[in-house]
Image (tube, helix red, strand yellow):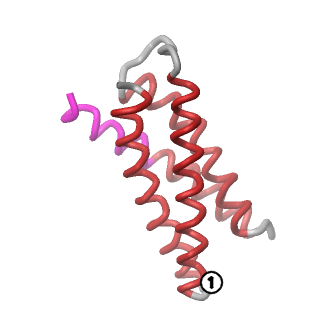
Amino acid sequence: MIKRELPVFIVVGLVTVAIDFVCYVSLVWIGVGVAIAKALGFVAGTVFAYFANRFWTFGHRDVAAGSVPRFAILYAGTAVANVAVNGGLLKVLAYSSVAVICSFVVATGVSASLNFLGMKFFVYR
């Protein structure tokens, strides 16, 4: 089953990241603080990810008992990790335009890995 779930999760993840990235960069560009912009981008991607992963990746047509709170707990934890990694790397890399993109990519990789494991073994077990 993981042979089907992982590629679908990657496609859903790429679209989720695109939503996150467009929101993040757009908000930073109009002057919103980096941490707030990153958090809002992450939330926008999260809403898409919940429905896409529920229906497409893991094939749950009905809301399984407890899956919504488990998803919320998972994403709250990975949002903290995402924003913390992004912010920490920006401090280390001195906030250059390249640093913004690099920090975004690394933060996204960390949270995506945690999200797949959490959804597979905690949310949609």
**Magenta stretch holds residue 3:** yes
- Residue 13 drawn at (x, y percent): 43, 45
Judging depth in this view, the residue of 76 and 16 nearest the camera is 76
Q: Label 1, on which residue? A: 95
Q: Amino acid at mark 1?
A: Tyr
Which secondary structure type mostly characterizes the magenta part of the structure?
helix
Q: Secondary structure at mark 1?
A: loop
Q: Is residue 80 above or below residue 70?
A: below
- Residue 2 drawn at (x, y percent): 22, 34
- The number of numbered badges drawn on the structure is 1
The residue carrying pointer 1 sits among few (fewer than 14), some (14 to 19) or many (20 or more) residues within 10 Å by Cα, namely some
- Residue 45 drawn at (x, y percent): 57, 45
Residue shown at the point (37%, 51%) measured from the top left: 113
Magenta span: 1-14
Left or right of 38: which side holds 51? left
Residue shown at the point (57%, 58%) measured from the top left: 21
- Residue 12 drawn at (x, y percent): 42, 40
